[in-house]
Each structure stands twice: as structure tokens, then as C-alpha cells.
Image (spheres, rainbow, N blue to C red):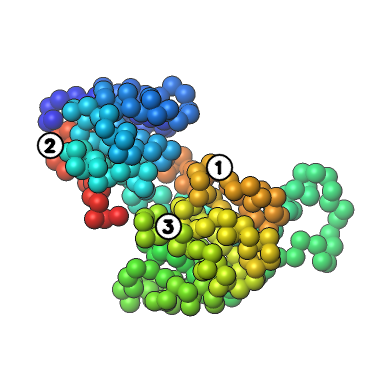
């Protein structure tokens, strides 16, 4: 495709700076409205595009990929995760998949700490009291939360985001523990004074806070299952800024309602934007609309990665952030 100006279809609105640069480099069809494409619209885009730029809300499965025209050779995902794309089927059809890793770690870690503080210090309840006009003044026993310093934080998935969370939590005086597919190098582990747990079950039983920072793959689906959630101390809280499918959301709800889990802070949900009924009603739960990576700087950097992947591909080279099934 070297030398050809590619036809690029973007499925969602992106920051103006990103859209402007794409328009300069490619024959780009941008999205006018900031809503997800329907399945029919996605199928039409696959038929006409040389490059598709989808987002996390776009499920590109095998059935949809069957609509792809012979000219489609790159799916340049606007996002770090690609669990919504059937990468194996895309590869079989000769379609390269790329993503945007590494640019959202700091933003997501910031939101993880915000949720930890929000749950443990009961910030939503305080905000609600102020907004409703119900606050009657300071009281020694009102809104009692937990002191962050000294609590044990168990990080599930110690990649770039997990390490960024560890650095922040360490500054708050938390004790850092983690479970990972592979143990970190000693110098990395030492930089955040982290303790490695080979057994996830043993770690869960001893932590005050669990932070989910692993991707969603077949092996991590419901990794925090009903059985594992039962291992948590009744005083423990769970925070998830990664992928909702890692937690059995129904089991989490049952544990929260029964007092077997003290609280939860969720920025992602098992069924996308459909939240398990009952979670909204619990005062010890903080829910956010998948905004962990929502900073202008992060969104622009994501766009820059997408553009680099497309331009490298257009020049006849492998995109620097190419995804292959074995990576997942």
C-alpha cells in the first residue's frame, strides 16, 4: 500500500487535533455523532475501508469480519485493549490489528487511586449530603472511613498500569502486594517495595484493598469468581479500572449486600454499560462511567499512536503496535 492515500473510516468522534491530522494524511471518513455505530454501519465500514479505526464499544467478531472487503488490511484500534476484536479471525483474513498501549497507564492509575479514596473515605456519601442539603454540621461519628496509610493493597496484574498504581499507593503509605503471571525483576519489585504472591487465593485472603489491573482474556474471565470473592475479608474493598469481565459481577453484588465485602469502586462493568441491577443502590459502592483514561492528553496520545500505526503500515512496514493472537 506504499504510496497510496488510504481510505480510513473512524467509528467514533475523536479529539479535534487527531481528526485534523488524520484528514491531512488520509482519505478519512469521520463520525459526525458521538454515538457507537450500529452493526450494519460497522459492516458497511468494513466493506469500504482500507483501514478501520474502531473503539472499545465496537465488537468486531468473526461474523462481522465476514463482511470485510478485500481491500481492508488494517484495523487500527483506538484503545489499548483488543478483547472486542477477533484478532485470530482477522489474521486468518490477512488483516493486521494494532492498538495503542502505554499511553493511558498514568491516567488509569490516577483514577484507581481516586476510587480507592472514594470508597474508603466515603466521598460519594459526603457529596450527596452536601448536594441534598441534608448536612447538619460536623459530627465525631459522621462519615467515618478508613485510613489509607498502612493498608495492604493487592494488585491483580502488575503491568504498566499496575506499577503506576503501586507507585502512587506507596506514596500514600500503603503496603504493596501483587499477583502476576510472572514475577517482576527484583529491581522493579524493589522500586515499589512490592511482595509477590504466587497464589492469588492466598493474596486475596490477606488484603485490605484489591485493585484489578489485568486485561480481559479467556484465562482472566471471572478470575475473581464467586469462590474467590468469598476469600476476601469482610473489611476488604475491590477497585476495578481494567475490564469488567474479570469480576463475577453478580457474585460481587451478593457479597456486598451480605456484608461479606466492605465496598467496591468500579469504572468498568461485566456487561459494558449495562450495570447489574442493585449495584447502583449500595452506598458503599462508587460507580464511574468508564472514565479512567478520560483525559484530553491521553486521548490525543491515543490518536497519535493510531496515526503512527496507520502511517507505518501505509509505508509498507509493520505497525509498531501490531497485535498478534499469541500476545493475548
Q: On the rendered image, what quadrant is the N terminus found in? A: top left
Task: Indicate which disc, 3 or 2, sits on the residue closer to the N terminus.
Answer: 3
Residue 218: x and y, percent? 36, 56
Q: CA distance from mark 1 to mark 3?
A: 17 Å
Residue 48: x and y, percent? 26, 23
Q: CA distance from mark 2 to mark 1?
A: 41 Å
Dot 2 crowding, Cα within 10 Å, few <14, some 14–19, many 20+:
few
52 vs 251, nearest the viewer: 251
46 displayed left or right of 163: left
Q: Point out which mark residue 248 bears.
A: none
Res 43 → quadrant? top left
Q: CA distance from mark 3 to mark 2?
A: 36 Å
Q: Which residue is mark 1?
A: 274
Q: Which residue is mark 3?
A: 221
257 displayed left or right of 177: right
Residue depicted at x 42% and y 76%: 199
Task: Indicate which disc, 2 or 1, sits on the residue closer to the N terminus.
Answer: 1
Q: Is residue 257 visible?
A: yes
283 vs 122, nearest the viewer: 283
Dot 1 crowding, Cα within 10 Å, few <14, some 14–19, many 20+:
few
Dot 3 crowding, Cα within 10 Å, few <14, some 14–19, many 20+:
some
SS of the residue under disc 3: loop
Q: On the rendered image, what quadrant is the C terminus found in? A: bottom left
SS of the residue under disc 1: loop
39 vs 241, nearest the viewer: 39
Q: Which residue is mark 2?
A: 316
Task: Indicate which disc, 1 or 3, sits on the residue closer to the N terminus.
Answer: 3
Amino acid at each position: 500500500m506504499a504510496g497510496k492515500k488510504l481510505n480510513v473510516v473512524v467509528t467514533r468522534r475523536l479529539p479535534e487535533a487527531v481528526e485534523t491530522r488524520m484528514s491531512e494524511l488520509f482519505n478519512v471518513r469521520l463520525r459526525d455523532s458521538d454515538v457507537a455505530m450500529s452493526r450494519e454501519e460497522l459492516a458497511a465500514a468494513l466493506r469500504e475501508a482500507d483501514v478501520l479505526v474502531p473503539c472499545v464499544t465496537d465488537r468486531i467478531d468473526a461474523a462481522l469480519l465476514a463482511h470485510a472487503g478485500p481491500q481492508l488490511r488494517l484495523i487500527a484500534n483506538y484503545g489499548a485493549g483488543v478483547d472486542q476484536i477477533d484478532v485470530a479471525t482477522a489474521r486468518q483474513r490477512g488483516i493486521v490489528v494494532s492498538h495503542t498501549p502505554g499511553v493511558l497507564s498514568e491516567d488509569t492509575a490516577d483514577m484507581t487511586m481516586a476510587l480507592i479514596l472514594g470508597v474508603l473515605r466515603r466521598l460519594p456519601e459526603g457529596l450527596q449530603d452536601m448536594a441534598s442539603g441534608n448536612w447538619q454540621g460536623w459530627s465525631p461519628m459522621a462519615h467515618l472511613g478508613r485510613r489509607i496509610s498502612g493498608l495492604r493493597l493487592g494488585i491483580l496484574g502488575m503491568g504498566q498500569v499496575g506499577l503506576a498504581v503501586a507507585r502512587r499507593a506507596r506514596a500514600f503509605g500503603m503496603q504493596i502486594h501483587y499477583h502476576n503471571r510472572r514475577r517482576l525483576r527484583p529491581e522493579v519489585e524493589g522500586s515499589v517495595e512490592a511482595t509477590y504472591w504466587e497464589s492469588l487465593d492466598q493474596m486475596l485472603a490477606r488484603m485490605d484493598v484489591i485493585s484489578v489491573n489485568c486485561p480481559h482474556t479467556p484465562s482472566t474471565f471471572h478470575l475473581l469468581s464467586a469462590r474467590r470473592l468469598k476469600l476476601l475479608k469482610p473489611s476488604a474493598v475491590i477497585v476495578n479500572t481494567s475490564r469488567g469481565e474479570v469480576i463475577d459481577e453478580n457474585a460481587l453484588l451478593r457479597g456486598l449486600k451480605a456484608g461479606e465485602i466492605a465496598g467496591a469502586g468500579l469504572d468498568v462493568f461485566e456487561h459494558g454499560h449495562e450495570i447489574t441491577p442493585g449495584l447502583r443502590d449500595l452506598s458503599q459502592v462508587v460507580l464511574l462511567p468508564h472514565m479512567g483514561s478520560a483525559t484530553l492528553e491521553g486521548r490525543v496520545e491515543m490518536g497519535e499512536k493510531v496515526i503512527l500505526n496507520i502511517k507505518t503500515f501505509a509505508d509498507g512496514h509493520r505497525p509498531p503496535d501490531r497485535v498478534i493472537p499469541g500476545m493475548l
